[in-house]
Image (cartoon, rainbow, N blue to C red):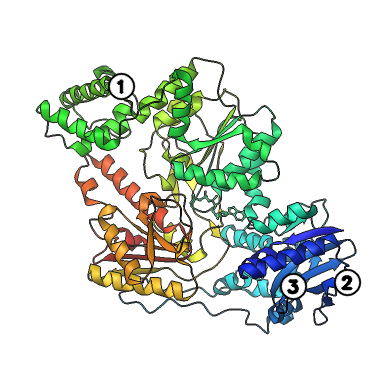
Amino acid sequence: MTTILADSFTASLAKLGNDEQKQVKLTAFDLQTDPDRPGLQMHRIDASKDPNFWSVRVNRDIRIIIHKTGDSVMLAYVDHHDDAYAWAERRRIEAHPRTGALQIVEVRERVEEISLYAPPPVQPDLPFVVMPLPPLPDLPLFAQLSSEEAMSIGVPADWVDDVLQASEDRFFALANHLPQEAAEALLDYAATGVLKKPRPVDASPVTHPDAQRRFRILEGHEELAAALDQPFEKWAVFLHPSQRALVERDFAGPVRVVGSAGTGKTIVALHRVLRILRADPAARVLLTTFSEPLAAALKRKLGVLVAENPRLSERVVVSSFEQAAGELHALMTGRKAYLIGREKLRGLLSDVAGAANLGRYPTRFLLSEWEHVIDAWQIGSAEAYAAVPRMGRKNRLGAKQREELWTIFAEVRRQVRAKALMTSADLFTAVADHFDARDEKPYTHVVVDEAQDLGVAELRFLKAIVPSRPDAMFFAGDIGQRIFQQPFSWKGVGIDVRGRSFTLKVNYRTSHQIRRMADGLLPDNVRDVDGEEDQRKGTVSVFDGVEPVVVIAPTADEEIISATAFLKALIDTGVSPSEIGIFCRSNEEMARAAKIAEASGIATVSALHADHANEAVLIGTMHLAKGLEFRAVLVIACDEGVLPLVARIADVADEFELDEVVATERQLLYVAATRARDHLFVSGVAPGSEFLDDLMR
Ligand SMILES: Nc1ncnc2c1ncn2[C@@H]1O[C@H](COP(=O)(O)OP(=O)(O)OP(=O)(O)O)[C@@H](O)[C@H]1O
């Protein structure tokens, strides 16, 4: 007899206490061994329209709901006695008459008894809230669709009439009652006006691709034990067709996957790694990203994907760009590379400029010029400095200024080398030069996450360590989240993704409301230097939530009062502190974040120490928010002068740099705000950051 595990079972199990969970698991093992065993105390759920639902006793109070057919037992749900029965009485499990996918269908007439359209949850009463609730149009969204069309995308027959009559404000509440494939297809249609009909699939109801996102067939106790101990990661088993296409296709050159925050770019990158490893037994893959904490997170997720075949992970290295280069450098030279830190470099630039009587160039400017021009392009002579491709900055420095500056940079370079130190760009370049000259490459493929923050030297390095085969390079990133690097031409470095840049549009992380607000910060289209466009418009979220809140308080103390009220309300509604992040622009504002937690009586943990498993809210700068995900996020201290940071604006040398600074500051706020799944609070002291106007548009 086959055992099938439904995601509704894993989700309901997670809500029980630890001891209860242990007992449930033991009963589940007994069921798997012999579902007909007399000691199991099974009762048919007579009040359910589906005759195959049975309850199984775990203890006096807890019941497992199973769905038993001739040749399989499905673990469907588990809860306290009455709730478990109520769940089964409101559902049936069947293959959809058109798509053929196995679905857990809520019986429409039973749902009416429990309110179909839950009233919108309200935010706590906060002072200084300025975000007006947007009026929602009451137009039917799907009036143009026929019943047959609704059925063709997997809407259960019971729900077709509701779907055809749904208006925008009701659709999201309705979507919670629909199978996910149907909800996604309807959202897609609402955003684009095109109904994408799934291609017919030749598969059994339970192995149908749409069913795979909610059911797993399990062989033996070990698999059941592993599945129950591990959260049911939906992305590990089911990809949206647009995600799957990117994972599985063969491409004629480097590929770039773009898409706004939460559209599953990282998930696609992970699956791509798996696909390469499976398809090519000789493949050696580097999976790499911006920082070590992000690499650690990738490694954890890859572990989930390769769980059934852990040997695959022997052929993949997961590390940050710098770590990957450092390891190859050590192999090449037998020595560890010692890197000069940013603060040391800043000091050195300032000292050298002072000694040369050139102290009139601000250190911040020197550092920026060094990082984005001299070091990034590895400029080695005054002539090369004159000829370097300077994005939008062609006329910025006169010949005389450049000569003066070159004397500073040449001396800094000399001193760094004299101390046997390297910059990270030196490291990338040394490794790139080494492998450029060789046919033997350390990796066959490189898969990159957060590719928008690749600099010139990093990109050259990645290109050099793989052979020039068409499928060697795969990049995932969001141009709208670039916060560390200045834009440059990828084509100029020999990487041409034209025609192979693809945009993901379904947002799995952030609620409809939060996504809509955050999208107000960025233009509908973002174009890179090579002219490749990321069409951000038309992205849809798969779930609904509360409206985010923007607070502009008269003083910092009053901002703290508002934020504290919000935080306390979250905790009161059952959000755990470990599911909350508080972010601010820089270390200067961190004390304000800490005060909010303190006033709420909650411990804090710094984002610098990535381990967030305890009962504390995480606090950190917006830069550290990258790659994280929370149920609730507070972005505080968005004051005028703080965002964009006045010190950065003060040092800009020209229009181009001003645009660039303002864009990355704006993108920082976008990154921080889009870490939130369900709740977002953004605050500042009056008059507030200019970006808040865009949030409230
Ligand atoms: N096919 C899927 N099914 C279910 N959940 C998914 C799917 N794809 C992505 N997710 C979930 O959506 C969230 C965002 O995914 P991911 O981190 O890959 O997005 P991203 O585009 O890389 O985001 P960001 O740009 O903010 O880094 C994660 O919680 C992920 O598990």
Question: In front of the other: label 1 or label 3?
Answer: 3
Residue 451 position within the rendered picture, expressed as x and y whole percent measured from the top left: 47, 39
Q: For the point 51% across and 41% down, which residue is it?
A: 449
Residue farthest along the right direction in this orientation: 70
For marks 2 and 1, give the one nearer the viewer: 2
- Is residue 106 or residue 174 the one in the foreground? 106
Mark 2 or mark 1: whose residue is earlier in sequence: 2
| Element on which disc 3 rests | loop
Give me the disc on residue 58: 3
Instruction: From the viewer's perspective, tell me whether residue 197 is left or right of residue 132.
Output: right
Ligand 1 within 8 angstroms of badge 3 C-beta:
no
Is residue 493 placed above or below 591 in the rendered structure? above
Q: Name the quadrant of the N terminus.
A: bottom right
Q: Looking at this rendering, what residue extends furthest in the bottom direction? A: 113
Number of other residues with Cα within 10 Å of mark 2, as a class: few under 14, some 14 to 19, many 20 or more: few
Q: In 3D space, how far apart are the residues under numbered discs 2 and 1 (Cα atoms)?
A: 76 Å
Whether disc 2's CB lies below 8 Å from ligand 1 is answered no
Label 3 near label 1: C-beta < 8 Å? no
Note whether residue 662 is visible: yes
Count neighbours of disc 3 (C-alpha within 10 A) and say few if under 14, some if 14 to 19, many if 20 or more.
Answer: many
Residue receiving disc 1 = 420
Tell me the tag on residue 316. none
Q: Which residue is mark 2?
A: 38
Nearer-N-terminus badge (1/3): 3
Mark 1: which amino acid? Answer: Ala
Neighbour tally class for label 1: few under 14, some 14-19, many 20 plus, Cα within 10 Å: few
Describe the element under mark 2 as helix, strand or loop. helix
